Amino acid sequence: MVRLLRPFGRAVTYTRWLHLIIAVVGPSMLIFVREEWWIWAVAGAVLVPAGLVPAMRTVEGLQARLLLTGHRQDQGSTGIVVAPSASWGDRGRLVLWLEARLLLGYATATASAQLVFATVELAVAPFGRDFEEGGLSLLGGHRWWHLLLVPMSLAALGAVVVVSGRLITALALRLLGPSPAERLAALEERTEQLLERTRIARELHDSIGHALTVAVVQAGAARAAGDPAFTDRALDAIEETGRAALEDLERVLGVLRESERPVSSRPTLTDADRLLESARASGAKVDAEMTGALDTVPGPVSREGYRILQESLTNVLRHAGSVPARVRIAVADGTLTLEIRNPLTAGIPGPGRGSGLRGIRERAALLGGHARTGHDRGDWQVHVELPVS
């Protein structure tokens, strides 16, 4: 019983009924002036050219969102589009929607009015009164038990309100919902958002992880050295690395705050010297070799290459410590090659698993390249090849 009464406690039940009544207000006013059947035919015919106007889809979509679903925005939660008609298919569905709304609105308004008249008639009949002409005459005479039929009439009225509202909402989702092309565009947009979130997660992992690793290594080295001069250099390196991490964090947060903000401000391989100096300041002996024109590498490839190099150097410091590392960056024959090698410290296994290496492989695959990581002749090697043309 409670379940049956639940819809009547929701405002959207009544706004749906109102949405249907609004559709027949104009023709109904003309009917009161002149009772002619052709008024409804004219009303239906007028809706055809109206539905062909692209902006009409926006008007109907906004009205349907507000009255049928209770949402003013967020297409994803309502399934009703408010964009203007973009194709003849959209226009055709809108014409069907307008005609269906008029027809269902007429049926709902008529049934509602007649059931209201019937309820009043049943309520006053036991008292020897007749309802005015034009009402729905259910039973003749003036019997006391007519009053017992009032709840049934009210239940029928409630059923009309609820069922018609659900029916018009289902039609709206079908006829005012996104077209196949719009669904595909929404899916692509959602995919782009997920990829952007994944990229931001990698940005934070690489940048903050690198800064924390450098800070921990430097602090440990300074404590072990016991040399004031070395401690000063370590603190300088920690400060510089922390400042760079804060800049990266600010850029990432800027992307979150401003989805349209350009990504050109993020570091590229032309800024690789900053990474190399940071690793050297942390105790690693980095031997770097750069060949080819790095400034000609496309922005997306260069930015991802920078992050791959950053993650690789972070892994060197985290897993091997202060060991010699060889870095080779080459641009030749339409390919960017990144190779980072370091000897494995005894007792410390190579970083064969983890989010860092997965991130390197994901970045390479996303750009159409490939990455190899693993043991190679006693060294740990990260070898990445990315297409640049």
Image (tube, helix red, strand yellow):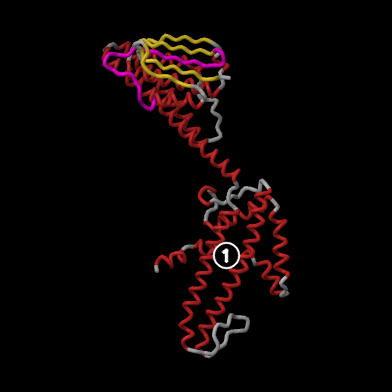
Residue toward you, 261 or 349: 349
Determine which quarter of the picture holds residue 219: top left
In the rendered view, would you say 176 is above or below 349?
below
Q: Position of residue 357 (x, y in %)?
A: 40, 24
Q: Is residue 37 left or right of residue 123?
A: right
Q: Is residue 46 left or right of residue 290?
A: right
Q: Quadrant of the N terminus?
A: bottom left
Q: Is residue 38 left or right of residue 333?
A: right
Q: Which residues are magenta?
A: 332-356
Local crowd size for mark 1, using a 10 Å CA cut-off: few (<14), some (14–19), many (≥20): some
Residue 344 colored magenta? yes
Residue toward you, 204 or 333: 333
Residue drawn where x is 30% and y is 12% of the image: 228
Q: Position of residue 304 (x, y in %)?
A: 49, 23
Q: Quadrant of the C terminus?
A: top right
Residue toward you, 66 or 369: 369
Q: Which residue is mark 1?
A: 18
Residue drawn where x is 32% and y is 14% of the image: 344
Q: Secondary structure at mark 1?
A: helix
Q: Position of residue 333 (x, y in %)?
A: 56, 13
Q: Position of residue 143 (x, y in %)?
A: 49, 89
In the rendered view, would you say 34 is above or below 285?
below
Give the amino acid at mark 1. Answer: Leu
Residue 328 colored magenta? no
Q: Is residue 144 left or right of residue 226?
A: right
